[in-house]
Amino acid sequence: MAVVDVNHKTAYNLSVQQTPTGYSSGEKSQQNETTRIDHYLSQLEATVPYLPCSLSYVVSDGFYSKAKWVNGVTDLKLEAIGKLRRDANLRYLNQEQYSGRGRPRKYAQHC
């Protein structure tokens, strides 16, 4: 983990840990098995006290674009910024009033 100074275009190393072997990488694992995301969240949680007070964003790549990571980051009172995975399917929930006919729309229509 590093703290990036965008004004000076440099990064300052803050925490280094090697990922232990034996962790699963995906969410296809069993419910009570610890995953890499859990390990990375625990590393982030241990690093938070050393972060500057003005820091509020965590930037990560597409591997971290999962609900477990984003929820863990927001639980630490930080904001998650990341590239979405190639298979991301973005949809907005329907906000329109139900007309009373047929099945209610789940997702909003495209413009």
Image (spheres, rainbow, N blue to C red):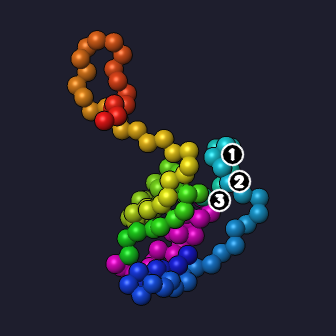
- Residue 3, which numbered label? none
**SS majority, magenta:** helix
Q: Residue at x 41, y 59 (%)?
A: 74
Image marks 1 and 2: residues in contact by CB distance under 8 Å: yes
Mark 2 secondary-structure assignment: loop
- Residue 36, which numbered label? 3
Magenta segment boundaries in residue numbering: 38-54
In the rendered structure, which amino acid carries the disc numbered 1? Ser
Q: Residue at x 62, y 78 (%)?
A: 16
- The percent position of residue 94, horizontal first and vertical second, equals 31, 31
Mark 3 secondary-structure assignment: helix
Residue 82 in sight here: yes
Task: Name the residue tied to disc 1.
Answer: 29
Is residue 46 part of the magenta span, yes or no? yes
Q: Residue furthest top?
A: 101
Image marks 3 and 2: residues in contact by CB distance under 8 Å: yes
Q: Residue at x 40, y 69 (%)?
A: 57
